[in-house]
Amino acid sequence: MRRGIYIGAITLYSAYFGYLVLSGRLTDLVNPRMQPFVIFAAVVLALFAGAELFLMPSRRSRTLPSGVALVVLPLLLVPLAGGNGGFLLSSSAPQNLPTLAADVALSAPASAPARTAAANASTPDFSGSSLTLTEKSYFALYTKLYARPAAFRGDTIEITGRIIRDGTSTGNQFLAAHLLMWCCAADAVPLGFLCAGPLMAGAQLDGWVRIRGTLSTTKWADPYSGVRATVPLVNVISVQQLPSADFVYVYP
Amino acid sequence: MDQAVRGSQFKADARILALYPLVFAGLCILAVKSLGSGFDPIILERFAVTTLSILVEALPFLLLGSLVSAVIHLYVSEELIARLIPKSRVIGALAASLMGFVFPLCECGIVPVVRGLMKKGAPLHVGITFMLAVPMVNPLVLASTWLAFIQFPQMVLFRGILGLAAAVTIGLVLSFLADRRLLDPDVLLSAMASRVLPASGGHHHDGPADGGPIAQLKAILPHAAEDFFEVGRYFFLGVILSSMIQVLLPDESLRSIGHSVLLSVVVMIGAAYVLSVCSEADAFIARAFMSQFSTGALVAFLIFGPMMDLKNTLMLSTAFRGRFILLLIGAVALVSAIIGIGVNLLPSVFALTGVP
């Protein structure tokens, strides 16, 4: 009985990994660079299930050691994962610490490329002095803006993000953020831009918005390390509420 | 012999079953928090997403480790390993610490190999250093550490160099403090039989199969599959508990602990011990804690975990006397703490600088 459940479980894991890859939902759980490893895992798990079934007759006369329930439990969580690799509940990206994005920016290299180089890059979309951050260009452009915020002062920027306020947001400031996924959704942290300006009526905390504004700079201090840095500030011109996110995660 | 195998199997099962209430309690707490103010599915959803994402990310490495372990089990003899180790104490310890580059075993598969080395006359300092270093400093673990900390490649160096230093130091010091009487050959024998092929009656002396690639694959797969389940049940437990901790612990208190020079190191050493995550996947767990904990705490986690954890203690307890295990745990914890605190006190030397 236990052996049957175990073989069924690893077969289901193999199928689930295949589903994640084929459906494109893998990137809701892990960084896209993990795809070859996940395909490998799907194949090996299928082979293991086959080995358990056909190559290990001694298992039939003995029950498996305890621990099958631990293998099965995560499978029961799949329906609860919502849009993040699951099936049932509505999509809602996990909310980790309300860490201001400058956590990442502060560790960006000081010798970041100048604006001219950035403008020639293939991923970020520069149109004159207007910057638009897309899913693919987000991290690259974000890094350039935080590395040399003064170089972009006065430019127009259009971003999307979820509205977040944390201990470092003062007055009419808020953070419009996506989630930066380094490796997997468990390590995702909010990554976005500090914005200043009135939010439109009805715009709620945690709601998704599209913001158009002009760039300036401001000083920001990490509440834990105390490190101060000059960061870009988006002075809001207009805010548009979005019913859902075009994209939740961005990847380095 | 069969009775010894069954007895050891029973003990291992009892240890696993004893941890079920912990998982059940965690699930109850999650359910109560979800139902606290009406039904709030977000907590359960976070738990589900966290668990599945760590699983999807780390499981491929565990599977790879199981396959490598099976290949070594079938194609590399313990005699060959013993022949390669020098007899000189210092050179022997240094050589043993680098054996992970030749035999990339994780801590889950190292105990039977060490027992084999000891039985064939390998000195204690070689056995201990081998057992502590190989699961941490080997290509698979360093590659997974690089992948997890791809923006911070210095972590690979911190783990490799400081981990090697820790393993060699502990191996040499313990070889002076302890002696072979702390090893119990009878217990080792039954432990070996129970850990290597517990469900197949302990026929652990298979050799390479004759025939082509299909025959070789047929020989490797059962060993790898059994190894995967033996290790995997502890791995799944670690992932589930890790996810629970991440979802249930208040973020702010964790951050305030996580940036303390001393407390953060102690907490992460405790986490490494309890979570018992395989060394091929623990870098991803550490990466998930990066925003909450100091660099020294993460380094201590990555060094302590492969050398000693709850799962490993459970395995060691079937092979070594209790006094030796206590001595080993104390030594590993002390050295890891010193390294972690040192990293925290020298941020200019051990800073994690991002490389986008």
Image (cartoon, coloured by chain):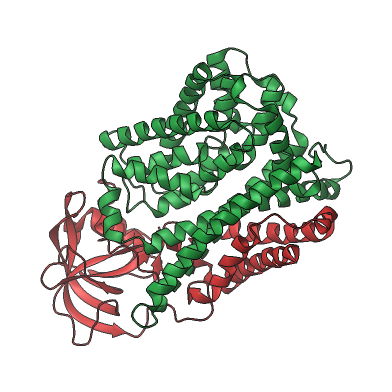
Chain colours: A red, B green
* Camera-nearest residue between A82 and A175: A82
- Residue A35 seen from this side: yes
Say whether residue A107 is left or right of residue A173. Answer: right
Looking at the image, the residue that sits furthest to the right is B211
Residue A234 x, y percent position in the rendering? 18, 69
* Camera-nearest residue between A69 and B4: B4
Q: How many marks?
A: 0
Task: Identify the residue at image location x=53%, y=29%.
Answer: B323
Say whether residue A172 is left or right of residue B210. Answer: left
Looking at the image, the residue that sits furthest to the left is A171
Task: Identify the residue at image location x=75%, y=43%.
Answer: B5
Residue A101 x, y percent position in the rendering? 27, 60
Task: Identify the residue at image location x=54%, y=42%.
Answer: B141
- Residue A114 seen from this side: no
Q: Is residue A163 above or below residue B7?
A: below
Residue A203 x, y percent position in the rendering? 23, 83
Quadrant where the C terminus of chain A is found in the figure: bottom left
Say whether residue B270 is left or right of residue B135. Answer: left
Residue A73 x, y percent position in the rendering? 58, 66
Q: Quadrant of residue B334?
A: top left
Quadrant where the N terminus of chain A is found in the figure: bottom right
